[in-house]
Structures are given as C-alpha cells and as structure tokens.
Image: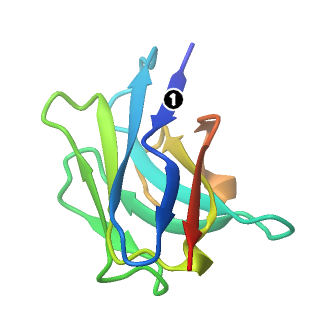
Amino acid sequence: QVQLVESGGGLVQAGDSLTLSCAASGYTFSRPAMGWFRQAPGEEREFVAAITWSGSLRFYADAVKGRFTISIDSAKTTVYLQVNGLKPEDTAVYYCAVDRDGRPTRSPFDYNYWGQGAQVTVSS
C-alpha cells in the first residue's frame, strides 16, 4: 500500500523559509513522478511543483517560481519542497502526490496517490 507522509509545515512569518518533506513507501512501480500541490480554504487544489524520479526534470507554478525548490533524495524515498520568501498568500495545506506513470504534470487528476497534507500558515 502506497503511503505518503508530509511533514515540516507550521506557522511562520512573511519572508521566512521552511522545508516540507514527503516520505514515500509501499510502492512497487518504478520511476514514478512526484508533485506538490496546495489548497487554501475555499479554493481548488493548485499545482506547485513537480519532478521526475531521476530529478532531471522539474517545473513550477508561476506563483512560486524562484522562491520554491523541489528535490528528491538519492535514496528516492523522500521528496522535498524548499520554500523561501513566504508570503501570506502561500498559506494553504500542502500535499505531495505520486504519478505512477512517471510523467509529471500540472493536473491533480493525473496523480494516483496523495498524502494527508501539511498546513503552512504565513502571517504578515
């Protein structure tokens, strides 16, 4: 059974940084793609960043480009999202997701498994 567990969220001030982690386990398919999404209250879930299993391809939403960095560890068990220069509008629940076909996209409908989410709250 695939399990994704996010950690690293919290309450921070505008301009602060933090690192979100997503520990993946229980998967049997090879070379999945990983993505980060976020959902603010009353809003739809939106794409943040995605990365291929090799780490050779990564891309970002325009709203976070230059401030957020997605990466994957060498053991291929944890995906990270480094978030810098946080803004109040970054406040949301952040989710990691797995696309078992290995093709990272911006659409949440292409991802097969999801974590439970990590709350990030940015105060002004």
User: What amino acid is found at the position of numbered circle 1 in the picture?
Assistant: Leu
Residue 31 in which image quadrant: top left
* Residue pictured at 39% horizontal, 29% vertical: 23
Q: Nearer the viewer, residue 15 or 58?
A: 15
Q: Residue furthest bottom?
A: 62
**Residue position for label 1:** 4
Q: Where is residue 92 drawn, in percent x and y?
A: 64, 62
19 lies above or below 92 = above
* Residue pictured at 44% horizontal, 58% vertical: 104
Q: Nearer the viewer, residue 33 or 35?
A: 35
Q: Nearer the viewer, residue 91 or 43?
A: 91
Q: Quadrant of the N terminus?
A: top right
Q: Where is residue 60 drawn, in percent x and y?
A: 40, 74
Q: Is residue 24 left or right of residue 114?
A: left
Is residue 106 visible to the viewer in this orientation of the structure? no
Residue 116 in which image quadrant: top right
Is residue 120 visible to the viewer in this orientation of the structure? yes
Secondary structure beneath dot 1 equals strand
* Residue pictured at 51% horizontal, 29% vertical: 4
Q: Where is residue 118 drawn, in percent x and y?
A: 57, 44
47 lies above or below 72 = below
Q: Is residue 26 left or right of residue 120?
A: left
Q: How is the image coloured?
A: rainbow
